[in-house]
Image (cartoon, rainbow, N blue to C red):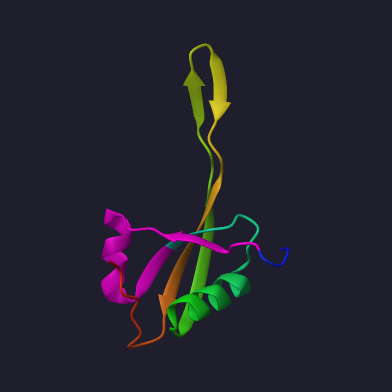
Amino acid sequence: MAAGQIIIKSILHTEKSSAYQPKGKYLFLVNNSANKIQIKKAVEQAYKVKVKDVNTFVSAGKLKRVRHQLGRTADTKKALVTLAEGQKIEIQ
């Protein structure tokens, strides 16, 4: 990954991700080419917390039809970040 590229695009605040928060887990939308080590460092630096574990998965883009043409939405990569015991990220 080239220097200067954004690793964490946003924190995802959905119903499912809200259920993870009491367990110390947070869901992030990340750059498709970012690896777990880069994600861990970026979260620790941005939110000043200690990261215990990072799990990543890619959500495949879907086929969409616009008038008579087929299109495709982009693939997205998400990271489920587990924080160390007692750590917390404040979400507004």
| View extreme (bottom): residue | 86
Q: Which quadrant: the N terminus?
A: bottom right
Q: Is residue 34 above or below residue 60?
A: below
| View extreme (front): residue | 4
Asked whether 51 falls inside the magenta stretch, the response is no
Residue 81, percent across and down? 45, 71
Is 8 left, or right, of 49 in this rendering? right
Q: Residue at x 56, y 40 (%)?
A: 74
Asked whether 11 falls inside the magenta stretch, the response is yes
Q: Residue at x 65, y 58 (%)?
A: 33
Residue 64, percent across and down? 49, 26
Residue 39, percent across and down? 56, 70
Q: Compare residues 4 and 60 and report the one nearer the observer.
A: 4
Q: Residue at x 57, y 78 (%)?
A: 41
Q: Is residue 44 above or below residue 20?
A: below
Is 17 left, or right, of 37 in this rendering? left
Q: Compare residues 55 and 69 and report the one nearer the observer.
A: 69
Q: Which quadrant: the C terminus?
A: bottom left
Give the magenta-colored segment's residue range. Answer: 5-27
